[in-house]
């Protein structure tokens, strides 16, 4: 019996699993540091300020480009005691709007992998983040036809996966989920009785790193390894 | 036969149908005008700038407080040619974070109406806006236990209602939806074969006003009129 026979549905995360996402946040941070540092007093690391403010704001404004942009404005004003020129803040907001419009850059082998897995399994997409941005990315990715269901959620914990699978009539024990985040894509799926496949991305956001895990899930190097893993 | 027998499910919009929402945008706009106007050249109406920028940004950043805050920052910089102090922009962003944390203020008679309608019909909630903010409002409203399903969507057009009702297994012809926006809550529901009940709110956002409609839906003055309408 092939491993794939144990599953009805294969779910995928999107950001940094199907397409690049973190890279453009890293680029925006580099721009932020370059634009704002000249107005900060000696000894103030504007990147530290941004990270602290971002972490404070997550429960209030969530993830995504808009929340990130508001944190950048707040951090720039705070770290420079209001000395940053308004035009710099205008550029930060303009850049955030550019990020929201950026074309999706698929990761290598993604369309072929979805086509291959889609021949043997039903596919769903569960992604975290901002509705307007995620929906634009899904629509412009050219991948949406592969998925029977697409859900954009605020946070990916066990309750969220349980609710969604229940709504879609999917048995968690016959569900495997693929993503780049151990914390959001793997552990909660394992918790509800499913299988998680971790496909690491070269950048992992600090907030997503899990220090201690002792298996219970699968680790593959590339998304393109999934068809072979299922057929094994 | 009571009118209510024609329906299995009663759906509700949330913002300005179950709880106040537009008021706090209007208050934020008044604050924006007060804070930014002193730095704008004579003859520049900062509120006009904000409205123009908001309308441009809707397809990029969507609805909701975070998109609104980014538009306020952009409009303040543009309308003052960068002369607005950074601290004013910081206050605008802080105010947006306050808006995201504001306690929900229910409209009069809402809990009683949901309890009454819930005795004879299944209830669902379909609301438009920002995931993190809407989810917080739903959770803190004390109303979420009334609803069998809750969906937060980017935009409420006929396709959106069709997809959601299909996913929930609800027959559109046996579905009635209640909301304050003719454009988002009533017309698309009528288009897919359902019934729309318009309960006007005293403020309607410019973008939501429909100039021309010739019926095909119900207009009630207060949400508390619904149990009687169904029983009639």
Image: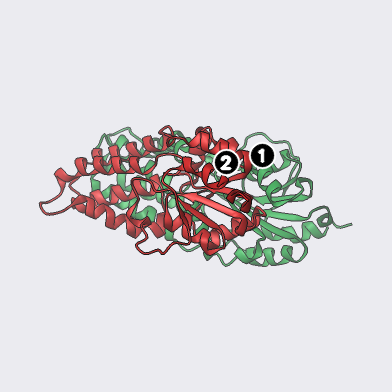
Chain colours: A green, B red
Residue B173, which numbered label? Answer: none
Q: Which residue is mark 1?
A: A158
Q: Name the residue carrying label 2.
A: B117
Rendered image quadrant of residue B55? bottom left
Viewer can see residue B183: yes
Alpha-carbon span between mark 2 and mark 1: 32 Å
Decide which of B192, A170 is in the foreground and name it.
B192
Instruction: Find residue A165 and report its horizontal and vertical position in percent.
Output: 70, 48
Is the C-beta separation of discs 2 and 1 under 8 Å?
A: no
x and y, in percent, of residue A140 in the image = 52, 65
Q: Which chain is home to disc 1?
A: A
The residue under the point 17% across, 47% down is B83
Is residue A113 positioned above or below B133 on the image? below
Q: Quadrant of residue B101?
A: top left
State the image coordinates of residue B154 (x, y, percent, origin top left). 49, 54
Percent from the top left, x then y, of residue B3? 58, 51
Label 1 neighbourhood size at 10 Å, few (<14), some (14-19), many (20+)? Answer: some
B10 left or right, relative to A58: right
Q: Chain of mark 2?
A: B
Left or right: B23 as drawn, with respect to A177: left
Q: Nearer the viewer, residue A14 or B8?
A: B8
Element at badge 1? helix
């Amino acid at each position: 019996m092939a491993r794939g026979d144990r599953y009805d549905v294969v779910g995928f995360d999107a950001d940094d699993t199907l397409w690049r996402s973190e890279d453009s946040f890293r680029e925006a941070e580099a721009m932020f540091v370059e634009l704002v540092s000249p107005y900060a007093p000696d000894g103030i690391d504007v990147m530290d300020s941004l990270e602290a403010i971002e972490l404070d704001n997550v429960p209030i404004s969530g993830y995504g480009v808009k929340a990130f942009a508001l944190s950048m404005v707040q951090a720039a004003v705070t770290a420079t005691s209001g000395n940053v020129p308004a035009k710099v803040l205008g550029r930060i907001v303009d850049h955030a709007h550019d990020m929201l419009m950026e074309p999706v850059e698929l990761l290598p082998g993604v369309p072929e992998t979805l086509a291959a897995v889609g021949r043997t399994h039903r596919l769903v997409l569960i992604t975290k983040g901002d509705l307007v941005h995620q929906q634009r990315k899904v629509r412009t990715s050219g991948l949406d036809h592969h998925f029977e269901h697409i859900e954009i959620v605020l946070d990916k914990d066990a309750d969220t996966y349980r609710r969604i699978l229940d709504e879609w009539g999917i048995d968690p024990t016959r569900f495997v989920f693929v993503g780049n985040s151990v914390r959001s894509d793997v552990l909660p799926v394992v918790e509800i009785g499913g299988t998680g496949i971790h496909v690491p991305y070269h950048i992992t956001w600090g907030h997503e790193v899990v220090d201690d895990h002792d298996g219970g899930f699968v680790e593959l190097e590339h998304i393109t390894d999934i068809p072979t893993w299922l057929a094994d």
